[in-house]
Amino acid sequence: MAMTRFEKLFVNRQEKGDRNIETVRNRLIGLNIQNIHDVLEVGCGIGTLSAFLSSEYGMNVYGTDFDPEQIQIAGEVYGEDDHLRFRVEDAAKLTFEDASFDLVVSQDVFHHIAVWPQAVREIARVLRLEGHLIWIDMVFPNVITKLFKPFVKTYGLYTFDEIWFEFWENGFDERVHERLIHGPFAYHHFVLQKVCSTVQS
C-alpha cells in the first residue's frame, strides 16, 4: 500500500537512510560480495540504500517501490545509469523474470503489504538459487494478529511463526537471525539463502 504523507516524512529522513545503510552493510558481512552482481531492493523509498549499494560495491541495483512519488524523488536525487535503476513495482506482482537477482533487500516493507505471502513467493521467484534475502521488519504478537487481522485490510499482520513458515515453504534457509525488541513488538533481522526451488504457483 502507498504510505501516508506522515509516514513518508518519517522514512525519508536522512538519519533513517543512514541507519538503513549501516544495517544492511552489517548484514552483508559474511556474504561473498564478489558473487553478488544483481540486486533488487523492495521498497526502496527515495533510493538511499539502492544508490549506496551501487556506488559502494559496484552492484547492478534495481530500487523499486509501490509509490510513484518515491520513485520520482529517487530518480531526481540519485539519477540512473547502467548500475542503478528505479522502477515502480508491486512487491506481490513483480515484473522481473525468474532468477534475475543474487540479492534481494526488504527493509521495513512487509508490514505495508497486505498480501505479504505473495510477496515472499515473488521474491523467491526472482532470486537465483543460492542467492540471499536480507529481510528486516517487525513481527506481531499472536494476540495482535488474532484481534486485528479480520479488520485490517491494507497492512500486513503476521506472527514470527507465520512469516518463517512462508520463508521455509518457498525454499529459504536461515543464515543469520537477530531478534530485537521494541515495546510489545519484536523486530527481526534475517539473512536468508534460497536453497531450493520450491516456489508455489
Image (tube, helix red, strand yellow):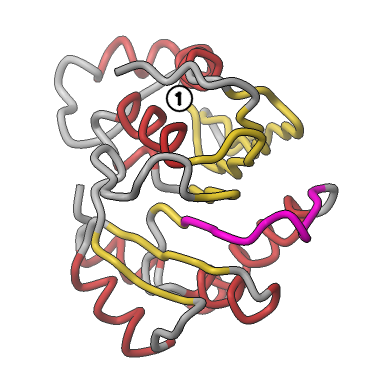
Q: Quadrant of residue 132?
A: top right
Q: Quadrant of residue 123?
A: top left
| x 24%, y 62%: residue | 88
Q: Looking at the rendering, in which quadrant would you find the C terminus?
A: top left
15 to the left or right of 121? right
**Percent x, y of residue 45:** 37, 66
Which region shows up in magenta? 31-40
151 to the left or right of 178? left
| Residue under label 1 | 140
In the rendered image, residue 37 lying in the magenta stretch gets the answer yes
Q: Amino acid at mark 1?
A: Phe
Q: Residue furthest right?
A: 30
Q: Quadrant of residue 176?
A: top right
**Percent x, y of residue 25:** 72, 61
Mark 1 crowdedness (10 Å alpha carbons): few <14, some 14-19, many ≥20: some
| x 38%, y 28%: residue | 121
Q: Is residue 84 above or below residue 173?
A: below
